Amino acid sequence: MHTPAPSASSASPDSTIHAALGRIASTCPAWDRGWCAAAACILEATAPKPGNVHPGAAFDDLTHDELVAAAVAIAPVLERAVDLPLGRTILDAVEASRRVTRSNANLGMILAIAPLAAIPDGPPDAAGAAAVLAGLGATDAADVWRAIATARPGGLGSSPRWDVGGPPPADVLAAMRLAAPRDRIAALWADGYAALGTGLVADLASELATARDVRDAIVRAFLAELARSPDSLIARRHGPAVAARVSAEAAAVLAAGPAWRDAVRRFDEGLRTPVRVNPGTTADLVAAALYILLRDPARRPLFADLLEPSPPA
């Protein structure tokens, strides 16, 4: 039986976020690609999303501190994403992350954010990501396959064609299309980012505009996405029936009205014991949605109070 390990830190969530942001390399200016990638991953990790790692709960092989270390590690790589082939960016980011963690911390986040960070001009939107992905070649495919092998993610299962344990495909998008029905990150590459923008990004923006706490906004947007689409990691590890049940439970939490935080705590407990059921792919998508909002100058006021603390009086 797996039980969550409590966080050793007694710091407030705001101070935890500010301290983590202060660790991002000075070569990554605030609000630029690398900084926003790290900030998105830090915010995602700090919000107490049910069934996931956060400052108050860890897995046996992954802690909040490691998620922060991984976020900080990938910032310099994604800062130069427009100057490198996408496959190389993904491989370099995964290698940087693995140097500071015991297990796969952020492969899904890297795969979801890297095409957005590689957009040379304009906002990180669906059209820009599609243009980046359309330019992929065999070398990119080899680097992406090597990155997946380096990350050693669990729960991928196997495939008779283009299995991640075998040789890479010449066309990585074709492989992602094949994997899309069972992996929502692959579906993001295969089907485009438009649904992310109209779904999770819109939910996050709406919640951030009305929530008193950015962590509440992230948790509620996470729940809305989980209610809308079963988590593909859960489906692969535990079966589609469990994934559908978890989605129904997420919808019930949102329907709890003013008591939703109590419902979240009960939901979280049920995802951790007696067996760990981790909606990890939904969390990865939250990080990508946060990146899109952070990179939008018009949306930065939604984060300003949290990410830019006032100087001491």
Image (tube, helix red, strand yellow):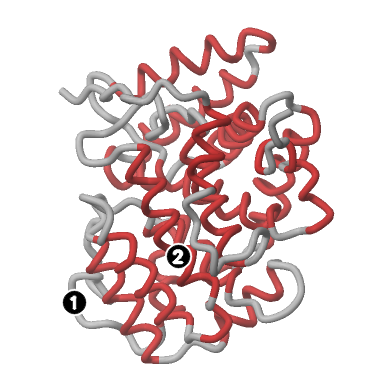
Q: Which numbered marker is on residue 211? A: none
- The quadrant of the image that shows the N terminus is top left
Residue farthest toward the front in the current orientation of the protein: 313
Find disc 1 in the rendering and name its residue.
166
Work out whether residue 18 or residue 212 is closer to the camera in this orientation and state it: 18
Task: Determine the CA span between mark 2 and mark 1.
Answer: 19 Å
Q: Position of residue 302 (x, y in %)?
A: 76, 41
Q: Amino acid at mark 2?
A: Leu
Front residue of 274/235: it is 274
Residue appearing at x 26%, y 76% in the figure: 146
- Residue furthest left in the image: 1
Residue 43, x across and y down, in percent: 55, 42
Q: Is residue 12 above or below residue 16?
A: above
Q: Is residue 194 shown above or below 200?
A: below
Q: Nearer the viewer, residue 259 or 252?
A: 259
Visible residue check, residue 43: yes
Give the crowd class for mark 2: few <14, some 14-19, many >=20 residues within 10 Å. Answer: many
Find residue 111 and name its label: 2
Q: Position of residue 72 (x, y in %)?
A: 44, 56
Residue drawn 28% across and 38% down?
238
What is the three-letter code of the residue carrying label 1?
Answer: Gly
Local secondary structure at mark 2: helix
Q: Is residue 237 left or right of residue 178?
A: left
Q: Is 66 or 238 nearer to us in this picture?
A: 66
Relative vertical location of residue 220 with respect to residue 34 in this rendering, above or below: above
Residue at image x 50%, y 56%? 24
Looking at the rendered structure, the secondary structure element under dot 1 is loop
* Quadrant position of residue 275: top left
